[in-house]
Amino acid sequence: MTRLAQILYVLVVGCLSGCTHVQLRRSTISQEGTLSELQIIQVLDNVAAFCDNDAALPFFALSSTGSAQVSDQGNASGAPNWNVAGMASGGFNLGANRTVTEQWGLVPVLDPHKLRLMRCAYQCVVGGDGDGCDDCWTELSHFYGPDFNPVCQLPRGWFCFGSKREIPKDACYVGRHCNTYAWVTHDGMPDLARFTMTILEIAVTAPYAPPTHTETEKQYDAEGRLIKEITRQVPDTSAIAAHQMVAPNVPPRPAPRQTFVPMAPPSIQFFPAPR
């Protein structure tokens, strides 16, 4: 490689390396923005599944690790030949290549207890009757403890479902299960965010543990001498009873279709009196 080729090669590689970090920053920020969408679409897909069959089995996967990689490569080949008259002949080629790789690692939730709680949460939100095997309100109350607030954690009426042709143009997110679609518009986004956080809480947090107090049991022999002292933690029964809840009054099941029924314009009608 001639001196000129070396100089041009250094210039090409320098330009590429100078903007690599810009692309890396852009790719990383863009990839981070997909996290919430991954969770929201999973929730809406499950909502569509439970609208189709309220005894469905939910799914959810957590994002564990992610990476964004940007690789730039440049090459130069050939060199011009100069004759005694100062004329150049031959060819010189410059090449550049950029590879962008973005990926997430997903960890599916496989704990049967968590899946049962998620199933209860979806059944409560959709308004289905379930199969009668689980007392969903009691199980969710035990999981959350005194912080259980069904109105905020299990909101209703924020989505619509139906066929594909019924999806409005202003739908922000759309979920699908078979031929059933569930969508949410801008007005339902706050409740969708709350319910998505409910599913995340079930997926990553441990059930509520009621406060305990220390009890000490002393054992004596026949002569009244202390032979053993046992200390253990006992759940506070008053705290357990305080957070027991019954199913609250919740709104009815959302309408299965988003339709518009035009109203007839007012008119004057004449009915002749019988003779």
Image (cartoon, rainbow, N blue to C red):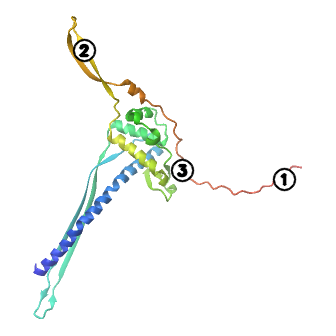
Identity, as a three-letter code, of the amino acid under mark 2: Lys
Q: Closer to the camera, 53 or 157?
A: 157
Residue 74 is left or right of residue 250, and the answer is left
Amino acid beneath label 3: Arg
Where residue 218 is drawn, which disc sits there?
Answer: 2
Q: Which residue, as the protein is rendered here, is positioned at the far bottom?
A: 85
Q: Nearer the viewer, residue 155 or 125?
A: 155
Q: Which tag is nearer the camera, tag 3 or tag 2? A: 2
Q: Is residue 77 above or below residue 274?
A: below
Helix, strand or loop at mark 1: loop
Q: Residue at x 36, y 44 (%)?
A: 200
Label 3 environment density (alpha carbons within 10 Å; few <14, some 14–19, many ≥20): few
The answer to which of marks 1 and 2 sits earlier in the sequence is 2
Rendered image: mark on residue 272: 1
- Pointers 1 and 2 in contact (C-beta within 8 Å): no
List the residue tagged with mark 3: 257
| Identity, as a three-letter code, of the amino acid under mark 1 | Pro
Q: Residue at x 31, y 57 (%)?
A: 31
- In the rendered structure, the answer to whether residue 275 lies left or right of residue 115 reads right
In terms of sequence position, does the residue under pointer 3 or pointer 2 come before the other?
Answer: 2
